[in-house]
Image: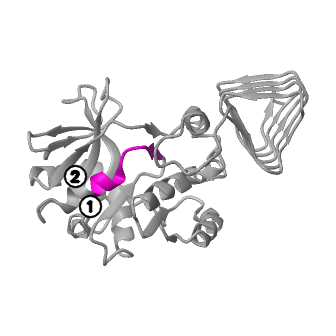
Amino acid sequence: MDPLTRDRPKPLLPVGPWTLVEHQIAALSRAGVERVVLSTGYRHADFAELVASVRARGVDLTTVVEDSPLGTGGGLREALRHLTDAEVVLVLNGDLLSGHDLSVQVALLRAAAPAVLGAVHVREVPDARPYGSVLTDDEGRITAFVEKSPEPPSRTVNAGTYVVRPEVLADLGTGPVSLERQVFPRLADRGALLAHREEAYFLDVGSPAALVTATRDLLLSPWPGAAETPTGPALVLPGAEVHPTAELRGGTVVHPGAVIGARALLDSAVVLPGARIGEGAVVRRSVVGRRATVRAGCRTEDDALGTGDHRPST
C-alpha cells in the first residue's frame, strides 16, 4: 500500500467517507456484534480519533497494542483477553472487505458440536495460487489448510473471515503465531474447523489500485454490509472545493480540504484531504494523497501519490 501507508495505518485509509475498518464495524454491527476489539501496532496512536467517533455512535470499541508483531494468532490471543464472556468471536483481517453473510457463518459454528472451534469463510476462485487453499469433506469439515503454493490442491480458498470459540485460546500459545500457517492446520487435523461456503463480494485492499476499486464499488454498486454511503458517479465531501467546469465520474471521491481546478477530469479517482488538482489535469484510477498536487495540464493514471507528493515531480 506504499506510499499511502507511510504516514497512515492501512485500516484507517478511506473508502468513501469511511475508513476501511468502519466498513468492517458496520458489517459486524449488522450481524449483532456487541463489542469490537481492534488489534493495532504501526502508528497505534492514530486510532484514537476513530475510537472516539465509533464509540459516539454507540459501538463498544477497544484497541489493543502489539508492541511487536504477534501474527494473526497472537493478535487474536490478545483480543480474546477482552472477550472472556463471548460465546463466539468473529475475526476479520484489517484490509479485507467482504459482502458475505456474517450471521450465517456465526450460526454455522453455534450449531456445531463443542469440539468444533472455528468456521472459516471459503470461496471458489479460478486461480488459487495467491491464496491459502483448503480441502473439505462431504460434511463441510475442513480436512487440510494449505498456505499459498505454486500448485494448490484445491480452488477453494480461505477468504479471511473466521468465527471461533474462545476455547481456541488454548491453541494460540504465548508468542507470535499465525492462524493460517500454524493454528488452523492443527485444528483441521483434529476435525475442529468447518467451512462456510459463500460466493460474495470480496476484495483484499492491499494496494492503491484496490483502494480505488473499493471506492468505485462503494459508490456505483455497494457490497452488502458496507457503511451507508450516498451512491452515484462522484461524491464531494463537505469542505472540498470543485470548480464547476471540472468533470467527476467513475466513482470518484473528493475529501475535505481538496481543491479541484477548472476543466480537470477525475475518473475513478480518490483525492485525499488537502490535495490540489490543477486546471485541466487528468486523474484516472489513481489516489492523490494528502496535500499532494497534480499540476495544471498533467495526467496521472493508475498511480498513487503519497502525502505532499507532486506530479510531475519537482
Which residue is found at the position 89% from the left and 26% from the top?
296
**Left or right: where does residue 252 sit relative to residue 104?**
right
Q: Is residue 76 left or right of residue 217?
A: left
Which of the two discs, 1 and 2, sits closer to the camera? 1
In this view, 48 is above or below 13 = below
SS of the residue at dot 2? Answer: helix
Amino acid type indicated by mark 2:
Phe
Colour mapping used in the image = one colour
Foreground pick, 100 / 206? 100
Distance in Å between CA atoms under marks 1 and 2: 11 Å
- At a point 86% along the width and 29% down the height, the residue shown is 295
Q: Position of residue 182 (x, y in %)?
A: 24, 52
**Category of crowding for the residue at label 2, using alpha-carbon neighbours closer than 10 angstroms: few (below 14), some (14–19), many (at least 20):** many
Q: Which residue is mark 2?
A: 184
Give left or right: position of 117 versus 91.
Answer: left
Residue 104 magenta-highlighted: yes
Magenta range: 96-106
In the rendered image, the vertical position of residue 177 relative to residue 241, given as above or below: below
Whether residue 23 appears in this view of the structure is yes
- Image spot of residue 123 (x, y percent): 29, 36
Figure quadrant of residue 167: bottom left
Front residue of 132/240: it is 240
Q: Earlier in the sequence, mark 1 or mark 2?
A: 1
- Inspect the image, locate mark 1, and give the three-letter code of the amino acid beneath it: Val
Q: Which residue is mark 1?
A: 164
